[in-house]
Image (tube, grey):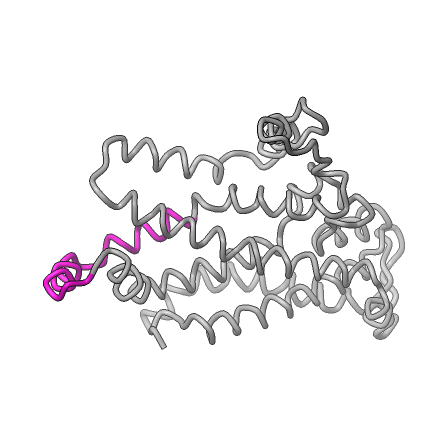
Amino acid sequence: MWGWLLTLPALIHTLIWVGAPVVVAIFMSFTDYDVVNPPEFNGGANYTELMGDQVFWRALWHNLIMVTFGVPISMFIALVLAVALNQALRGQSWFRTMIFMPHVTATVAIAMIWLWIYAPGTPGLANRILSFVGLGPFNWLTSTDLALPAVILVTIWQGIGIKMLIYLAALQGVSHELYEAAEVDGANTIQKFFQITVPLLRPATFFVLVTSIIGNFQTFDLIFNLTNGGPANATTVITYQIYVAAFQQFRMGYATAMSVILLLVLLVLTLLSRKIVGGTDGE
C-alpha cells in the first residue's frame, strides 16, 4: 500500500501528461482536423494514405539509417572515452567537460557551427582541411549523396557526451578486483575490455541504446536548421514530416497518424533492443 501511495503522484502525472495525450493522438489519427474546423471522423483514411506516401517511407528509412550507423558508432566512441577517462589522467575533469559540452549546448547553436564547417567551397572548415590533402571541395549539405551522412556525423558528435557520462557512471560500479584477478590470469588490456568491461556494462548499454534510438527518431531541430529536409528530401525524417503536415499543411489528423506509426516503430525497436542486448537483469 505504501509503495502505491508513494508512486501515486508520479503515476497521476504520467497518466495526465503522457497517457491522455497518447489516447487523444490515437483518436485524432482517425480524423480530418485543420485546427480551424472541428475534427471529422474519416475511418482509416489517414493510414491508407500513409501506406502510399513515398516521402513518409523515405523519411522512415532515413531514420533507420541514422539509427543503424549513428547509434553504434557513437556508443562505441563513448564507451572507449569513458574507459579512458575512468583512469587517473591529468586534466581528467577538463576532458570530461569538453566532451559533455555538445550535449548541453543549444542545438540551434550547434547547427550554426556545423553550417560554417560544412560551408560550400574552401571557406568551409571541412573543405579547407580536406584541401590540404587534395580533396574536395564538397557540397556537404546540398548534395543528395552527402547530406544525410553529414547530418549523421553531427548527431554522432552531439550524442557522445551523454553516452560517455552514463558509461562513466556505470564503470564506477565495476570492481577493480575483477581486473586484478584477470591480470593475474594473464589477460591483456583488450581481453579485459571485452571479457569484463563490456559484459558488466550490459544494463547501461541497454539504456544507452534505447534512449539513443528514441533520440535519433526525435531528431527535428538539427534537420530544420541544417537542411530543412533537403535536398530533394534527402535528409527528411519522420518528425520533420510530422511538422510539415501539422504546421505547414495544417493536416493535424494526418500528422497524428504519423506520430502513432512512430510510436509503434519505437516500441518494436525497444523490444528488439532488449532481445539483442538484454535488460537490467542481464538476460
Q: Quadrant of the C terminus?
A: bottom left
Front-most of residues 262 and 139: 139
Residue 207 is left or right of residue 173, and the answer is right
Question: Residue 168, percent across and down?
Answer: 31, 49
Front-most of residues 6 and 131: 131
Residue 1 is left or right of residue 123, and the answer is left
Question: Residue 19, percent across and down?
Answer: 59, 65
Does residue 97 lie above or below 5 as drawn? above
Residue 124 is left or right of residue 58, and the answer is left
Q: What residue sits 50% from the left and 46% below the top?
A: 159
Q: Which residues are magenta?
A: 163-187
Question: Residue 214, percent across and down?
Answer: 56, 58
Does residue 46 lie above or below 232 as drawn? below
What kind of secondary structure does the magenta stretch mostly adopt?
A: helix
Front-most of residues 218 and 21: 218
Q: Residue lying furthest front in this view?
A: 134
Q: What residue sits 41% from the left and 72% below the top?
A: 278
**Image quadrant where residue 266 sits:** bottom right
Residue 167 is left or right of residue 11, and the answer is left
Q: Residue lying furthest left in this view?
A: 184
Q: What residue sits 26% from the left and 62% below the top?
A: 191
**Image quadrant where residue 27 sits:** bottom right
Q: What residue sits 86% from the left and 50% below the top?
A: 249
**Image quadrant where residue 34 sits:** bottom right
Front-most of residues 153 and 52: 153
Question: Residue 170, percent across and down?
Answer: 30, 55
